[in-house]
Amino acid sequence: MNVDRVLSVLKKHTSGSASWYGHCVEVSAASRNLAELISEQGHQVDVEQTAVLGLLHDLGRSRGHNLRHGMEGYLLARSEGYEREGRICLVHLLKGRTLERGVELGMLTEHELRELKTRNQRWDRLTLEEKIVCVADALTSDARLATVEEKYADIRRRYGAFPHHYEDENWIQEIAAELTELMGRSPYEALKDANDDFL
C-alpha cells in the first residue's frame, strides 16, 4: 500500500469539509519527517509505511468523533483490503492498552474483542512505525505543532478530564522518550527544527 492508494481510500470516505482528512495528511507528513530523522541516525524504520499509517490512523473519524473511531477505522480499512495497515486505527487509540481495557473504555464491543482475539496479534505492542504515528498525532493540533502537554490540555478542555486522557498523555510521553533516544532530540524539537511546511 502506498500513499496515493491511501489518499484514494480517505477521499472515498470523506464527505464535505472533513477536518479529520486534513489532520491525517498533517500527521502523515509529521510521521514521515520523524521516520526520516530516525533513519538518518542509522535505525531501521520503514519511512513510506510510516507515512501510510499516518494517513490511515483517523479513518474511523469518517464515521464519528468518539472513542469508537479506532475500531471503526480498522473495520473500514479491513473492508478496503488493508487489514494490516488498518491496525494503526485501533492501536493509536488503545495506546498500549489491552483489548479488554479498550472494551471497558467503550472503544470496542465484547463481540469485537472476541473476533480480534482470533487474529493472533498483540494489540498492546506497537511497531516503531506505529509509535511514530502516535507521537506525531499527539504533536499536531488544529493544523499546528503542539507539545504533548498542550495537546492533552486541549483534549481535556474539549472532552473532559477523564482518567484515560491522563493515561494517554503518560503513554505518549514514554513513547516520545523512546523516539528521543533514537533521534538524539525530542520529536517536538525535531519537527520544530525541521522548519517544514507540513503544518
Image (cartoon, rainbow, N blue to C red):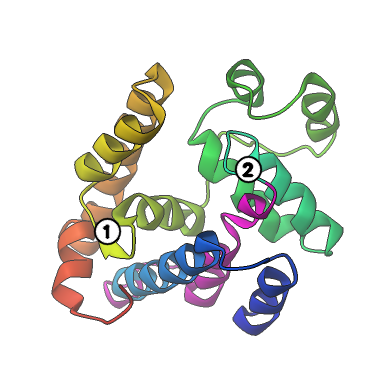
Q: Is residue 162 above or below residue 15?
A: above
Circle 2: residue type: Gly
In magenta stretch: residue 50: yes
Magenta-drawn segment:
39-63
The dominant secondary structure in magenta is helix
Q: Position of residue 122 (x, y in %)?
A: 65, 36
Disc 1 + disc 2, Cβ < 8 Å: no
> Quadrant location of residue 31?
bottom left
* Amino acid under disc 1: Leu
Would you name the residue on which mark 2 appears? 70
From the top left corner, tell me how far across and down residue 121 is, in percent.
71, 39
Q: Give residue 186's quadrant in the image.
A: bottom left
Please tell me how crowded label 2 is: few (under 14), some (14-19), or many (20+) other residues with Cα within 10 Å.
Answer: many
Residue placed under numbered mark 1 in the picture: 182
Which quadrant is the C terminus positioned in?
bottom left
Q: Is tag 1's residue or tag 2's residue first in the polypeptide sequence?
A: 2
Q: Residues within 10 Å of mark 1 (few under 14, many from 20)?
A: some
Q: Is residue 144 left or right of residue 117?
A: left
Q: Quadrant of the N terminus?
A: bottom right
Q: Observer-nearest residue: 74 or 186?
A: 74
Measured as percent of width and height from the top left, residue 115 is found at 85, 31
The answer to which of 106 and 123 lies nearer the viewer is 106
Residue 125 can be seen, yes or no: no
Q: Is residue 11 left or right of residue 175?
A: right
Point out the frontmost of discs 1 and 2.
Answer: 2
Q: Which mark is residue 119?
A: none
